[in-house]
Image: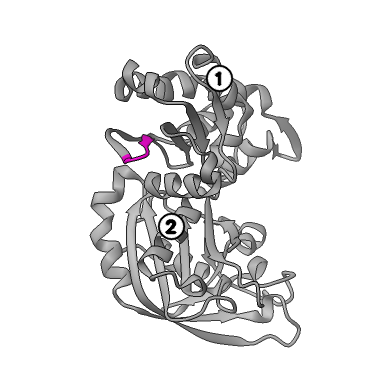
Amino acid sequence: MKVSTITFPSVFESAFGNTENSSRDLLNGLKIKNESIWYLAGNLAKRGGINPNKVVNASPQEEDYEVLFKAALITVAETIQQPMFVTVGFPFSTYNVYKEAAERFLARKNFLVEYDTQTFHNRGAVKKALFDIERFDVIPEIVGGIIGLKKVLGPQQPKSFIAISLGFGTIEGAMATADGLVQRTVFSSHGLRYAINNLTRELNKKYYLEMKNEHQLDDAFVKGFIFINRKNIDLKQLRKEILHQYYKEIISPLFKRYFTDSDFENCEKIYLLGGGAFYTELQEAFQEEFKDVMPVEIAPDADKLASIGYLYNSLRISDEKFESAIGIDLGNATTIVSTFENEKR
């Protein structure tokens, strides 16, 4: 069956004031209640909030995780068949620390989510949706990415390859073979947040950033410009310098540490996953370093592969219940929810 993915920014903010008729649909008008507080989430928070934010690599015990998890559930409330089978994941660096907490969180089994449809509907109202989880699993993010990559590539996948996931909070990597992961090659280190922080330091030398948070600066980094005091500041050259330095100081040493000449001999290709894979500057840096070693490619659906991998893992634990499987990637920059499309709908 075909995979459907829904994405929204991993940010939220407490909701105050009138939010009626502020969006065109549910995905862009996420307003949910957690305990006694209403929150704007995703695009609505990004567009209508004052200082939307999220803790990077949030623990399942933190409010950030629960708010975004509930927001993710609401996006598929009308399409998923219950009880559900859910898979989530964490970067390799936090997986062992957060796995048990995530299992306790999901072991609640039943999640009652209160949300407001007045943000996008003239006759909207506060509604409630109950989500019932039959089984769940928590796996490393890089494992989810490799599962997703293999499913997307299908029979054309190389026998052995290196997968590098370039995320906001972490960069993850590993070598995958037909037998599975080569564990000694699995690593996790500083993600693109490292580059964003360097951007902030450089801009602070010349400009007052008006308390812009790192997620807002990440948006500017992606776009290549930022408005400061009603002036459009071009960031493209600075971005190029920062990303080249990030590659030199963070990424390149990881290859020297975790991969041997034998690994390069046995691998056919390097795949770039995650949102950072779309930066031309990083693509060129990878291709320059490995031009005499092996091809470097941006993976198909690079930014969605972890969620797709989680989805297929949910399908596995559900005994092939396509209509009830869901993969939720609560990423530091973007939350991505994957389900299988019901062709009969």
Q: Name the one closer to the observer, 284 or 177.
A: 177
How many marks are shown on the rendered structure?
A: 2
Q: Residue 114's x, y, as percent?
A: 51, 82
The colour style of the image is: one colour
- Nearer the observer, 276 or 30: 276
Among the two numbered marks 2 and 1 on one chain, the one whose residue lies closer to the N terminus: 1
Q: Quadrant of residue 120 in the image?
A: bottom right
Q: Nearer the viewer, residue 138 or 316?
A: 316
Q: Secondary structure at mark 2?
A: helix
* Residue at left offset 32%, top offset 18%: 262
Q: Which residues are magenta?
A: 175-180
Residue drawn where x is 51% and y is 84% of the image: 129
- Kindly check if marks 2 and 1 are in contact, taking CB atoms under 8 A apart as contact: no
* Residue at image mark 2: 310
Where 108 falls versus 198 (above or below)?
Answer: below
Residue matched to label 1: 287
Asked whether, in this view, residue 18 is left or right of residue 137, the answer is: right
Spot occupied by residue 131 in the image (x, y as percentages of width and height): 44, 80
Q: Secondary structure at mark 1?
A: helix
Q: Amino acid at mark 1?
A: Gln
Q: Residue at x 56, y 66 (%)?
A: 340
Q: Residue at x 53, y 57 (%)?
A: 336
Q: The N terminus appears in which quarter of the rendering?
A: bottom right
Numbered tag placed on residue 93 in the rendering: none
Task: Determine the main secondary structure of the stretch shown in magenta.
Answer: strand
Residue 226 visible in the shown view: yes
Q: Position of residue 113 (x, y in %)?
A: 48, 80
Residue neighbourhood size for the residue with mark 1, other residues' Cα within 10 Å, grouped as few (<14), some (14–19), many (≥20): some
Residue 305 among those drawn in magenta: no
Left or right of 136, for residue 308 = right
Q: Amino acid at mark 2?
A: Tyr
**Dot 2 alpha-carbon crowd within 10 angstroms: few under 14, some 14 to 19, many 20 or more:** many
